[in-house]
């Protein structure tokens, strides 16, 4: 078996060197099916994104659904990442039928990767939608991943997601039972072969891997109009199973998906980051994965803490009708946000703040002082 794994990994490496990622993916899958090691699984998942078709064919929902069904029936390895990305429909029953179509596929670590994403960010959460989770469990049982049990055990699902918690527990138990001794080992030489392919698969681009999350965000804030930095960040997040990566990728597409609203319902507060303390969720709008409009709330101290935060770079509109605008620190903050190009609304009850914004930030007191100083200068010149 070890020799067979080595042969498949060598074939994958040669295919990558020759510029044939599709052939490399097939060889890596053969190696993973013999020894389902995490090193090979990561390469499969990363290479799957590289060879993934850009989109389903067609512009209408019915045409795209027909293309999804066709690709699912043809069982081409290069299509699976796209099929999993486009799996979710508005109903649990319809989505379960798609999952059932995938049970005809041979085992693939991308099933576990997608499942972990669904458990972290559940698309269906009521017991009436259990058919989705039951079908997902059946799919995972056909090709279990040895690391899935440990990853599911680390999830902290809230009590109101009972059906999701039960399903995650069942999958974790099944995975542990299938691999009682843990993940099967991979020979040192085979691990070295896997490491040699990392740069070709994009599993861990050295330049990208060296970046911190804040550095990704800084690049996005510095080039706010561009999608490129956002999609690189989305890939980095998806490699780590973070649902925000999926959300950014979805919102950067031209057509909308009901999945966006589901993800926002679950994660909007978290994705606001430090701004979550001063931006109300009601009326909050996201575009291309980042907040663009909302209502400012919070205490003076909370507002002061985030007044100059870089995350305001993606905002275009803010309602300030609920903040203590008479406070100098709040006035200074709102004027500063206005100077950054954010449209300030809700000024009907704060004419002094509207005036300060019009004057470019100088308060009425400062205006009076400046005027008196100018008058004093004029008097001196007259006396002269």
Image (tube, grey):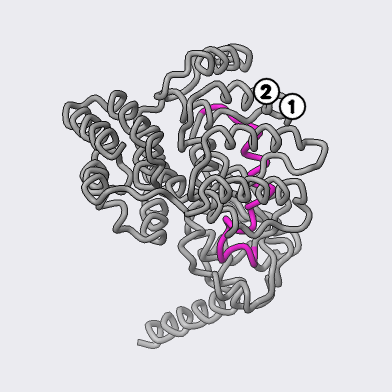
Which of the 4 image quarters holds residue 281?
bottom right
Residue 118 spot, x, y in % from top left: 61, 42
Q: Taking 319 as reference, is 383 above or below it?
A: below
Residue 79 spot, x, y in % from top left: 44, 23
In the depicted view, which residue is nearer to us: 190 or 341? 190
Residue lying farthest right? 128
Q: Residues within 10 Å of mark 1 (few under 14, many from 20)?
A: some
Q: Taking 253 as reference, is 326 above or below it?
A: below
Residue under pointer 1 = 93
In the depicted view, which residue is nearer to us: 94 or 167? 167
User: Residue at 48% of width from left, 31% of height from top?
Assistant: 107
The dot on residue 11 is none
Can residue 58 be spotted in the picture? no
Residue under pointer 2 = 97
Can residue 229 be spotted in the picture? yes
Residue 276 spot, x, y in % from top left: 62, 62
- Left or right relative to 260: residue 188: left
Tell me, yes or no, whether the two marked residues, 1 and 2, touch with CB atoms within 8 Å: yes
Q: Taking 39 as reference, is 14 above or below it?
A: above
Q: Reply yes or no: does residue 203 show up in magenta.
A: no
C-alpha separation, residue under disc 1 versus residue under disc 2: 6 Å
- Left or right relative to 275: residue 232: left
Q: Mainly helix, strand or loop, the magenta region?
A: helix
Q: Which residues make up the magenta segment?
A: 254-278
């Amino acid at each position: 078996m070890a020799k067979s794994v080595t042969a498949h990994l060598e074939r994958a490496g040669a295919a990558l060197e020759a510029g044939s990622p599709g052939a490399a993916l097939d060889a890596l899958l053969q190696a993973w099916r013999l020894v389902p090691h995490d090193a090979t699984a990561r390469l499969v998942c990363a290479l799957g994104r590289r060879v993934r078709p850009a989109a389903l064919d067609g512009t209408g929902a019915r045409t795209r659904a027909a293309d999804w069904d066709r690709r699912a029936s043809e069982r081409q390895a290069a299509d699976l990442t796209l099929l999993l990305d486009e799996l979710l429909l508005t109903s649990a029953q319809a989505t379960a039928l798609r999952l059932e179509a995938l049970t005809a596929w041979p085992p693939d670590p991308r099933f576990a990767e997608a499942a972990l994403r669904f458990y972290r960010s559940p698309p269906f959460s009521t017991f009436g939608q259990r058919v989705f989770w039951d079908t997902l469990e059946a799919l995972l049982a056909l090709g279990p991943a040895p690391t899935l049990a440990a990853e599911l055990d680390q999830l902290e699902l809230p009590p109101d997601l009972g059906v999701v918690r039960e399903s995650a527990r069942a999958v974790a138990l099944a995975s542990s039972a299938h691999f009682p001794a843990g993940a099967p080992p991979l020979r040192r030489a085979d691990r070295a072969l896997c490491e040699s392919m990392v740069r070709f698969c994009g599993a861990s681009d050295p330049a990208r891997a060296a970046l911190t999350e804040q550095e990704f965000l800084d690049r996005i804030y510095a080039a706010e109009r561009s999608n490129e930095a956002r999609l690189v960040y989305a890939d980095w997040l998806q490699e780590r199973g973070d649902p925000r990566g999926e959300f950014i990728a979805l919102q950067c597409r031209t057509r909308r998906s009901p999945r966006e609203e589901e993800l926002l319902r679950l994660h909007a507060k978290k994705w606001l980051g430090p701004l979550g303390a001063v931006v109300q969720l009601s009326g909050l709008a996201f575009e291309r994965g980042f907040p663009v409009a909302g209502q400012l709330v919070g205490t003076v101290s909370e507002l002061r803490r985030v007044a100059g935060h870089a995350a305001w770079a993606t905002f275009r509109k803010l309602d300030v009708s609920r903040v203590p605008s008479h406070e100098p620190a709040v006035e200074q903050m709102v004027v500063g946000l206005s100077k950054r190009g954010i449209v300030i609304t809700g000024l009907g009850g704060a004419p002094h703040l509207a005036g300060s914004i019009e004057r470019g930030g100088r308060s009425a007191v400062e205006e009076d002082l400046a005027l008196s100083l100018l008058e004093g200068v004029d008097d001196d010149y007259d006396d002269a």
